[in-house]
Amino acid sequence: MTWRRPSLLVAGVLLAGTATACGGGGQSTATAFDPNNCQGGTLEILNQDDAGSHLDPARLYTSGGGNIPSLLFRTLTTRTRKAGADGAKVAPDLATDTGQPNADATVWTYHLRDGLKFEDGTPITSADVKYGIERGFAAELPGGAPYLHDWLVNAQNYPGPYKDPNGIPAIETPDAKTIVFHLNSPHGDFPYLATATQFAPVPKALDKGADYEKHPISSGPYKIETYDKGKSVVLVRNTNWSRAVDPNRLACPDRIEGTYGLDQAVINQRLSTGTGKDADAVTTDTDLGPSELAQLDNNPELAKRVAKGGFPYTYYIAFDNTKAPFDNPKVRQAFSYAIDRTSVVNAAGGSSLAYPATTFLPDNKTMGYQPFDYFPAGRNGDPAKAKQLLAEAGFPDGITVTLAHRSADFNQDGPKVATAVQDAYKKAGITVKLQSIETDSYSTTVDNPATQPQMALQGWGADWPSGGPFIVPIFDGRQYLAGGGNFNTAHFNDPKVNAEIDEINKITDPAQAAQRWGQLDAEIMKQSPAVLLFHTTQLRLYGKNVKNAFVSDWTGVYDLSQVSVK
Amino acid sequence: MFTGRFRTDRAAVFGAVVAGLLVLLAILAPVLTALEGQDIASFHNDLVDSARGGVPIGSLGGISGQHWLGVEPQTGRDLFARVAQGAQISLLVAVCATMVQVFLGVVVGLAAGLGGKWLDTVLTRLADISLAFPVIIFSLALLTIVPDSFPRPLLLALVIGVLGWGGTARISRAQTLSLRTRDFVAAARLSGAGGFRIARREILPGLAAPVITYAALLLPSNVITEAALSFLGVGVRPPTSSWGQMLSTATTWFRSDVMYVLIPAFMVFLTVLSFTLMGEGVRVALDPRTTRLTRKAG
C-alpha cells in the first residue's frame, strides 16, 4: 500500500504571519494572524477522499490521513510545526524530549509530560503508548509502516495484543511516565519514527479491535463528534486538552467539519468562489484544476490563496523483477526508454503539478538527490531504442502486457496516466492492456504478491525527510513481505544494496548519509527495477478567511493544527 | 403515401437529413479521420500548454486545418476522431438498445394481448414495473458488477434494452387487443389458424405502425441514456471515446476550454433533435388522424 499524500505542500513561499485580507466582498478588514487570539469559528475541509483509508492510529501510514490524524492523536514526538527547513526537525510531543539514546543508539528512553489526558479525562500512561504500538503488530489491523517490526528486538513475529496479551518485551514501561525501547541495531532515526501514529496512546479498556476506527479515543486538541466513513467527519474541542500540555498545536477553530467524496472541479470551484461557509474551507487532497491554473496569471486574489509545495513523492511503474518478461534486464530497459514523460506529466496535471522523474529520489537536497538518467528517453521517449532492446531480448514482434491503475484519478495513479503510458508504449511495439482496480482495494491488491498485477502504477512518499525511508521499503530485499503489505513490488533483492543500506544506517551525520543515499539511488536505478514516471508538486487553494496556512519542508503541506478561520 | 406525407413535413425532412449525415459520420469515421490525417489514440504533447494544466494551444480549443475540431485538453488527442468514434458508439448502442426494446416489447405485448387473462395480468404488471423502474440507477448497479472483459457497447445496449421494453409492450398489447376482435382475425381463427400463426400473420402487421413510431422516439432517448451512463463513468471504457465520457471529463475544463464542452454537448443535442424530429414525422405520416400539435390551427 502506498502512503497517502497528505495535504498541501509548499516549496517556498510561506504565508505564516502574513496579513490575509478577505478578498471579494471586503466584508472584513485585514488583520494579522495572532496565535493568542485565533480561537473560534468552524473550519471546513472539502476533500475527494476520506481522511485516511482507516481512522485507526494502528492502520495509518506515518503522516498519512490528510492531516486529520494529527488533530486526534498525539505521539511521543511530532513534526516541528514551523515553516520551511525548521519544520523538517523533530519536536517532542507527548514526551518531554525527542528521546534519550544510549551510547550506540540501540536503547531509547522517553518520559511523558505531566497532565496528559484522554478525551474522557483518564490520564495517559506509558502503558497506553506501549499498547498502541502493540496494536500495530496485529494482523487484524494492517496498514502501518514496517519499521517497528524490523527495529525492535525479537518483535518480528509478535502477533499483536489480541493473540498475545503479554506484549513486546523490547518495550519496557518501568513506571507510568517512562517508556524504553530496545532496538536490535543502531537507529539514529528513531525520533523520526516516533512521530508515526502507531506511537499514539490507545486505552486498552476502550479498544474495540477493527471497530476502534469508528470512534478512536483522542489525545489531541479535538475529538470526534460524528464520523461517517467515506462521507463526513465532525471534530469538536477535546476539553481535556490544552495548550499548556501541548506546545505544538495551536488548534484555532472551535469545530472542524470534513466532507468527503467531492469532485475535484467542485472543490476548486467552491474554494475559489468562497461563498458562505466555503470562505472558511481548505482541502487536504486536491490540487488546482486547469480552470484555476489558467487564472493564476491574471487573478492576484486567487494566486495569493494558493499554497505551493513539494512533498517528496515519486510515481513509477512497478513490476516483479523475478517474473518473465521483467526478469530480463533488456525488457526492463526497453520499458524505461519507451516512456513518454511529457505525456505522463500532462496526464498528471501538467508541468505546474509534476516534473519528469529519472531518479527515484525526488529533487530535494535533504533526501540526498543526485541527478542522473541512465535510460535517456528524452522528452517523448525513444521507441527505436526500446524496439531494438526488445528484439535483442527475444520480442522482435513486440510484447503485450497488463497495466493496473486505480479506478479514479485523484491520486495520479488513475486512468489518465495509464492511458498516457499505453499510448507511449504503443510506439515501441508494446501493447498495454489496462486493468482498472477499485480505489479502496487498489493498494491491498498491488502490495500483496499473491494478487500483484503484472504492472501497476505506484507512488511513494517520504516517511520522514531522509533518503532511508524513501529507498529502504521499496528496494531492500529483506523488506519483501510475501503475505501482503509488501512495498517491495519489484521483488528486488541485491545483497550489495542491502549491505550498503546497513552501512548508511550507521551514519549519524545527516548530510553525509544524504550523499550516500543519492549514490545508492543511482546504483539501484542502473538495474532498472522500475520505470520512473514523475515527481509531483502541489498547488492547493484555501478559503478567503483562512489564515496561517504555511508549509514545512517535512510534510510539504499546510498544517490543520495551525490554521485559523477567525 | 407515407413518403409523400413525410416529405411535406419540413422539420421531419431536416431531421432525417441530419440523422442520415450522423449515420454517415459514424460509418465513415475511420475514413474521415484518415482523410483528416489523424487517429484516435495518438497524443500530441506539443499542442497543449503543460504549465496551464494542458489547455490546448490556440483559440477555440486548438481548431486548425490539421485538427478540424481542435484537440483534447491534457493529451492533445484529435477531437474530431474522438467525436466521430463517439458517434459510432452512441448510435450503435442506441440502435441496438432500441432493437432489444422493440423485440422484447412486441413479444410480451403479443403474448399479453392474445394469451389468457392470467398471462395478460402478469405480463402487464411486469411491464408496469419495468416502466416504473429507475433505469439509470439500476443500470449503474448492473454495469458496475459485470466484469470489464464483457464488450462494453454490447453490454450497454443490452442493459438499456432489457430495462426499457415496458412502453413498447403496453402499446403492442393495446393494439393487439383492438385487432384481435376484428373480423379478419376471427376469420383466420375460424379457418383453423393457430395462435402463433394469427400473431405472426394477422396481428403483427397491424402493430408495425405504432411500434415503428414508438421506436423512432425511443432511439433519441436511448442516445441520452447512453451519454448519461458514460458521463457517470459506467459506460464505455477508455481509450474508447464516447460523448458522455467527454462531457464528464469536460466538467473540469468548462472555463479554460469551452469548446471541449460545447462540441460533445452539441453532438448529443443534434442527434437527439434530428432523430426526434424524424420520429415525429414518421408518427404523423403513419397515422394521418393525428396532426402535429404545432400545426393545430384554430
Image (spheres, coloured by chain):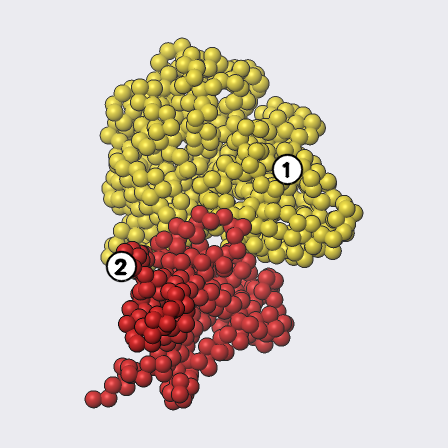
Chain colours: A yellow, B red
View extreme (front): residue: B191
Q: Which residue is mark 1?
A: A320
Q: Residue at x 52, y 31 (%)?
A: A485
Expressed as whole percent of the image width and height from the top left, the position of residue B82 reads 53, 66
Residue A498 shown left or right of residue A344 in the figure? right
Q: Nearer the viewer, residue B8 or A400?
A: B8
x and y, in percent, of residue B238 in the image: 52, 57
Return the chain for callout 2.
B
Q: Nearer the viewer, mark 2 or mark 1?
A: 2
Labels in figure, total: 2
Front-lying residue, B44 or A537: B44
Q: Amino acid at mark 1?
A: Asp
Quarter of the view holding residue B184: bottom left
| Above or below, comparing residue B278 to residue A281 in the picture | below
Secondary structure of residue under mark 2: helix
How busy is the neighbourhood of tag 1: few (under 14 within 10 Å), some, or many (20 plus)? many
Label annotation for residue B117: 2
Label 1: chain? A
